[in-house]
Amino acid sequence: ILNVEQSPQSLHVQEGDSTNFTCSFPSSNFYALHWYRWETAKSPEALFVMTLNGDEKKKGRISATLNTKEGYSYLYIKGSQPEDSATYLCASGRDYKLSFGAGTTVTVRA
Amino acid sequence: DGGITQSPKYLFRKEGQNVTLSCEQNLNHDAMYWYRQDPGQGLRLIYYSQIVNDFQKGDIAEGYSVSREKKESFPLTVTSAQKNPTAFYLCASRGPGGNQPQHFGDGTRLSIL
């Protein structure tokens, strides 16, 4: 089991503000890093799959960066909106065996 | 619409009883997974299957069993040997090729009566 950690556990953001949070994972034998968004009462939805050091991915106002040498990824939300309220999960590992972090729960206040 | 269907949404188990959680997908995916979520913890892998008629234990397989007789179905049985079954269970599938994301169902919440 890979030790994947996410911080902070939760955060509150004012609507319109930008925010970011971290996923840490073992840098040795790195294969891939996944980000998922999990809204209340829905199923987790894939945001990004990242594999290369220095990778940057973007989907609307959400973007992510990857540093495989030091074992971390940042997820950024620009201009947070109430619909961004969710738990964001990261996972690292091979396709058939991902290890998930406990998630960062983001609450956007109007 | 293509997706993953888990049923039931809520399930209650009596002491000594086996219960089966259903997971069906119409995405034509070969790989399927079962995860367990407990408060404050990440998803933990129970079992996975990369192809029909084959499955492998994940990190916390004790007290659980699965079958994969059809490509679209991957039911999970929580046996009486699982002493702490109260949790949220998620099923997922993954498409072909490397580095594909997983697609998840809506989950089943299992509680003890």
Image (cartoon, rainbow, N blue to C red):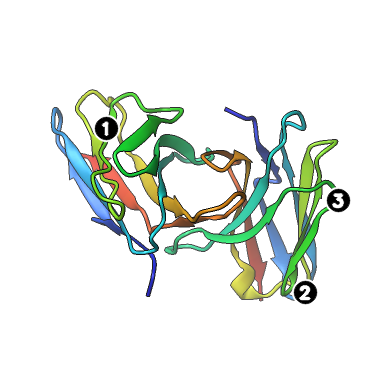
Asked if the residue at tag 3 contacts the one at tag 1, i.e. Cβ–Cβ closer than 8 Å, the answer is: no
Label 2 SS = loop
Q: Amino acid at mark 1?
A: Ser
The residue at which mark 1 appears reads as B65
Q: Amino acid at mark 2?
A: Gly
Q: Residue at x 56, y 55 (%)?
A: B101
Q: Residues within 10 Å of mark 2 (few under 14, many from 20)?
A: some
Q: Quadrant of the N terminus of chain A?
A: top right
Q: Residue at x 36, y 45 (%)?
A: B89
In the rendered image, residues at marks 1 and 2 fall on the same chain: no
Can I make out residue A51 in this image?
A: yes
In the rendered image, residues at marks 1 and 3 fall on the same chain: no
- Most foreground residue, B51 or A26: B51
The residue at which mark 2 appears reads as A79
Q: Earlier in the sequence, mark 3 or mark 2?
A: 3
Q: Position of residue A58 (x, y in %)?
A: 75, 67
Up-down: is A69 above or below B10? above
Q: Amino acid at mark 3?
A: Gly
Asked whether, in this view, residue A7 is left or right of residue B51, the answer is: right
